[in-house]
Amino acid sequence: MGLLKTGINEIIATSAFNAAPMGIHLRDKEATMFLFPGSHTAENVVRDGWIVANIIHDPVMYVKTAFDDLPRDAFVEEPVSGRLMYRLRDAEAWIAFTTQFERNTAGVLKVHLTKEKEIIEGVAVHPVNRGFNSIIDATVHATRFRENKDPELKRLIEYHADLVRKCGGKKEMEALDLLMQYISY
């Protein structure tokens, strides 16, 4: 499917002027994502019928979009299939999708994604960096920890924070500091 690979692809999804880290599941050439009812992303996707997957390699952006809103100038308007969609200005690549809801079970909306447009804005090679990967994992745990203060999630955040400190570079350290501020460590 072009830029996406089989498995869960971590991207920053944009809908209207909203951005949030998400996973797009690609299995058997079918792309889906799971949204939580009541979130800004879910409300926008239900209302507008589209989402844009932004491929970006900035750990700070993953943390910021997990916990905060971006200013409107962080977005670029793109005409896609007769409608206006919004992507991140700093995306290295992006994929515009129309959406169709498959089911709503256990409080989660399963969304089928149909690719409408795929653009590579810039080409860069990003070697595997365990610090970057651990920021992604720590951010996922932190969004849940902030809601329920589960000690097991705190332990997982600390585990990934140690990996960031050991393996990350300057941007990963900046992202970790920001993450810790958001969860009030």
Image (tube, rainbow, N blue to C red):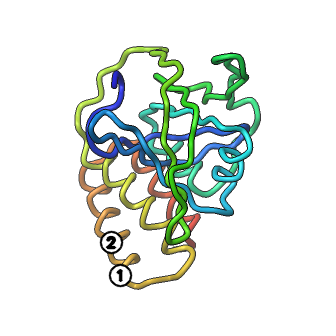
Q: Are marks 1 and 2 in contact (CB under 8 Å)?
A: yes
Q: CA distance from mark 1 to mark 2?
A: 6 Å
Q: Which residue is mark 1?
A: 152
Q: Is residue 143 left or right of residue 77?
A: left
**Residue under the point 66% across and 59% down:** 39
Residue type at numbered disc 2: Leu
Image location (x, y in percent) of residue 148: 53, 81
Image location (x, y in percent) of residue 153: 39, 76
Residue type at numbered disc 1: Glu
Mark 2 surroundings within 10 Å by alpha-carbon count, few (fewer than 14), some (14 through 19), many (20 or more): some
Q: Secondary structure at mark 1?
A: helix
Q: Secondary structure at mark 2?
A: helix
Q: Is residue 18 above or below residue 56?
A: below
Mark 1 surroundings within 10 Å by alpha-carbon count, few (fewer than 14), some (14 through 19), many (20 or more): few
Q: Which residue is mark 2?
A: 156
Image location (x, y in percent) of residue 44: 71, 46
- Could you say which is closer to the camera, residue 177 or residue 115? 115
Q: Is residue 131 left or right of residue 82?
A: left
Q: Is residue 105 above or below residue 98?
A: below
Q: Is residue 163 above or below residue 158?
A: above
